[in-house]
Amino acid sequence: MRPAVVVTGISGNLGRALAKQLHRHERIIGIDRRPFVGKPKDIEMHQLDLRKKKAEDVFRHGDIKAVIHMGIMHDPRMSPEEHHSFNVIGTTRLLDYCARYGVERLVMLSSANVYGPSPDNSNFLSEDAPLMAASRFSGVRDLIEVDMLAHGFFWRQPSVATVILRPVHIVGPTIKNAPSNYLRLKYPWALAGFDPMVQLIHVDDVARALIEALRPEPKGVYNVVGPGEVPLSGIFRELGRTALPVPHPLARPLLKRLFKYRLATFPVEELDHVQFLCAVDGSRWAQDTGWKPRCSMRETIRSVLGE
Amino acid sequence: MLERLGDDVVRGLKRWTEAMVGGPLDEKMAALRRSENEYGVDPFGFNLDYALAAIAPLLWLYKHYHRVEVFGLEKVPKGQVLLVSNHSGQLPMDAAMIGVALLTQATPPRAIRSMVEKWVPSLPYVSTFMARVGQIVGTPENCRRLLAAGEAILVFPEGAKGIAKLWSQRYQLQDFGLGFMRLALETKTPVVPIAVVGAEEQAPALVNLGPVARLLGFPAFPLTPTGLPVPLPTKYRIYFGDPLFFTGRADDEDAELDKKVRVVKGAIQAMLENGRRERKHVFW
């Protein structure tokens, strides 16, 4: 049998989009706690937790050449302990298996959110900018830790070519992350007087980027940018919505209560993303791989509507 | 509703600008539109239509209130350049007037980028306004990126100490930051010194209320006789000096950089004194 590509977190929206693109070219082994609905027949699926011993068997028995790791969760409602354990211990184990079972290449999905929105940010952050997100939003602490674990592994373990992708806000018809949910709101809020430049990328483009990262050239950390940047107000205009401008000293305490009583799905810290800049420079990725997103800005924005 | 109202206001103001400049601007400004995407903004959030609308009231002030006279505008070289000016007046009218001069008087027109304080992005409305008219937070990365794109960048090395100058400190250049010189050396960018005469008298401040400033998170809180920093109709004279070229190491010791910075400071001080000698009165 051909050497396989292990994909963690394959049952999520992005995982399924990736699997659909990749399974025609590579043998895929999927690992996820959730069942893979609508799994193509040629994908070998293991429904298990990365932290369990059984996950090691997948590596021990299969001939694995590459790993795409996106089995990382971000759910503000989950208990912080479980959250942290799943992400950090899961990733630590996975890195260990990669080193021990001769995996040649590891592609890790991180996020441009690790830099964090802030009024001090440069308009375009490059890969060496400090990861400041947790200074204002402790809920993203383990996403940063996971990114740094992989970064450390990149230096420590030269036998495994490690690529860390930090894509901008991922949106798509079935994606349920904060930016997609926010743009799908019928009556969204905006912060009065703030209209930051926002970068979005279509889920299919992220899947393509992850596959691109399996090629031999890319190495190290990359920001991945979609079709460019647009003011938040421009996005709402494209979607035919009008955001309700709420003064920011009012919006914060209000959203805090709403979140507490489960009337809103956004933790208050997410407001930083509609107030301040967190845009990145994707030129290194474009240079090393000749990257061009396939979805236009219009398609990317409208994708949240399921078009 | 609000959006349509906003669009109408932008169109109306843009027509006012065109009336004052005397003719349609779209053709003249075509080159400035190059980097715009389908949503009308460049990657930094600059929007030419918005900028042309926003300058209408400033252009009126330029022509009829401060009656700006510009000298040596042709000395600004093409492509990347650092414009270094004195800073004063409590409100950054000096930046606005330099910007209007370069956008409406220079051929070809130039949309300058100035480096704004880091607290600007945390101010509602001001942050959006600044971004749409092309003003950027003053980080070294932003400056490098814009210079590489061939932009003209306006720097006030006096910073907040300059704009908050008291009446007794007028035309006394405060300490210059060294950051602009490091960038000029690193990116081999010519430096054009600028002296703005007239802005230093526009809003005489008597005291700076430090504790109030700290309370509000402002860099300074100068108090003028009226309480508000409303500019008086002083006559502006803006002098552009010959471009200065510097060579050397960008990571040199501060003392070495300071020598070069003093050359720029000296050029501005000389133009300031010359300008004050030439004028007959603060108001005309």
Image: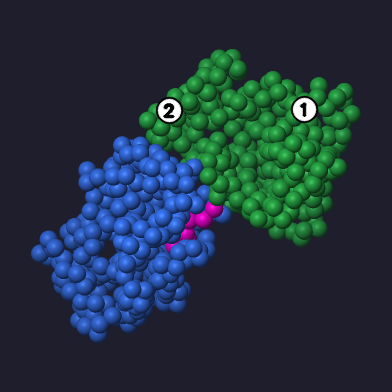
Chain colours: A blue, B green
Please rate how many residues cluster around mark 1, counting C-alpha atoms within 10 Å: few if below 14, some from 14 to 19, many from 20: many
Q: Is residue A117 magenta?
A: yes
Can residue B36 be seen at all in this image of the molecule? yes
Instruction: Specify the quadrant that holds the C terminus of chain A.
Output: top left
> In the rendered image, which quarter is residue A30 located in?
bottom left
Horizontal side of residue A63 vs B275, given as left or right: left
The residue at which mark 2 appears reads as: B5
The subunit carrying tag 2 is B
Horizontal side of residue B81 vs A29, given as left or right: right
* Residue that appears at 40% across and 48% down: A199
* Residue that appears at 19% across and 57% down: A20
**Spatial separation of the CA atoms under disc 2 and disc 1:** 34 Å
Which residues, given as a range, are shown in magenta? Answer: A114-119
The residue at which mark 1 appears reads as: B234
| Amino acid type assigned to the residue bearing label 2 in the image | Leu
Local SS, label 2? helix
Please rate how many residues cluster around mark 2, counting C-alpha atoms within 10 Å: few if below 14, some from 14 to 19, many from 20: few
